[in-house]
Image (tube, rainbow, N blue to C red):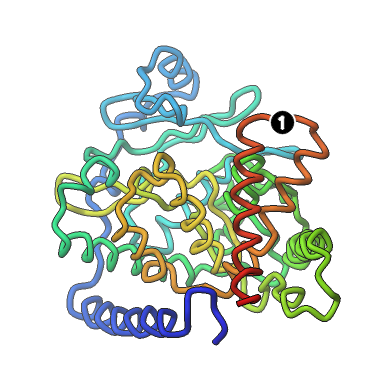
Amino acid sequence: MDTPRGTSEWLLYTVLGAIADVLSAILTSVMPDKRPQRSIAASDVDKLTDEEILVLSENAPDLHPDAAVFRLTPGTVAKASQDMGGDIQDASEANTLNLLFTETTIPVPRVRRVVKREWDFLIVIDYIPGSTLAQVWPTFSIWKKIRIAFTLRRYVRQLRRLRGSATTPPVMVLAPRLSANLYQALIGTDTPSTQRICGSPIFTQVRFRRGPFASYSELSAWFNKRHQMAMDIEKLPQDDPSRNDLFDDSRPLVMTHQDLNLRNIMIDEDSRIWIIDWGWAGYYPEWFEYVAMEAQNEDDEISGTNDELWKAMIPFICGPYFKQERAWEAGMGFVLCLSELKENRIFSIDYVLCFVKSSLRLIRPIETAAK
């Protein structure tokens, strides 16, 4: 297999992953996963009206100012929905959390209420006592870090069992396994919008929202067009092998978090691992999780750590999608940043940094091939 990180490394991660999956199957058969008790218990907002919740939210203290999350009640937090585009009638993050609560055993905050506001939705979810891994990761032993990586791999495998149908566009809006009646009960409408802007670090951090895309093939065509633009900018011959590193749409769309980093992973008082912040989640190619994690971890502030062991664990957690990463790196980020510079004519430091980093990604594979 021709990969930028080497066949031996790909084989090592593949074998380790297979061994971990066998162990996971054995553990599950002996000790089935159980849902956290706090997710089943009643909430302290259950008897509040939507109007009362909105009043509470006006003076609620910030929990994470940068993420617009605030402590609504002792048992809940609230955050604004991130949906953009079209006639948005529901909150996709709430839909995602409800789907995960119904179809998986991944510990995620349970949705307690979705309240419509003038421009968005207020999502009320359980407050999870504990710490983010970004806060406590340096204090853990190597063995505990490995156990966490093993747990996260099990979570990712559960996510990938949730597949989009043949007509599902990128970005999940309505979970296909939820009935219209259940959707009505959870969200308050049975006519969800299917046109959503996609958010992903794969679109570059300068402009991480793109779309909406009506279909999987439209997303694929969008990326392939920009890949060819990168090859043209480098003036590569039409028969150059790099032109064949196209967008991999060979596998079904699966549920993907797309923002897995130590700031969005929590460990509670019982040492249970929780995944939070599902605002970018949706149905995407399974390799998006890996590439998104790698892209996030280029910036220590975003990833929450500069620990090399954590970075080495990413291919184990998500799978070693080195070939797909190469196709993305070999020009994709370069062209996206270049197009932003041309279209917006804004030479901010973020645009320039994006351009420089993506240029280096583009040069490295070409230099390697030349050697």
How many dots with numbers?
1
**Residue 193 visible in image:** no
Q: Nearer the viewer, residue 267 or 320?
A: 320
Work out whether 19 lies above or below 321.
below
Which residue sits furthest front? Answer: 371
Give the residue at x 41% y 84%: 8
4 lies left or right of 359: left
Q: Nearer the viewer, residue 192 or 315?
A: 315
User: Which picture quadrant has residue 120?
Assistant: top right
5 lies left or right of 144: right
Question: Residue tagged by mark 1?
Answer: 347
Q: Quadrant of the C terminus?
A: bottom right
**Residue 243 visible in image:** yes
40 lies left or right of 223: left
Position in image of residue 165 (x %, y %) = 65, 70
Indicate the secondary structure of the residue bearing disc 1. loop
Which residue type carries mark 1? Phe
Q: Quadrant of the N terminus?
A: bottom right
Give the residue at x 45% y 45%: 299
Give the residue at x 75% y 55%: 213
Position in image of residue 81 (x %, y %) = 55, 35
Position in image of residue 131 (x %, y %) = 24, 40
Q: Nearer the viewer, residue 69 or 135?
A: 135
Work out whether 84 lies above or below 252.
above
Give the residue at x 66% y 37%: 351
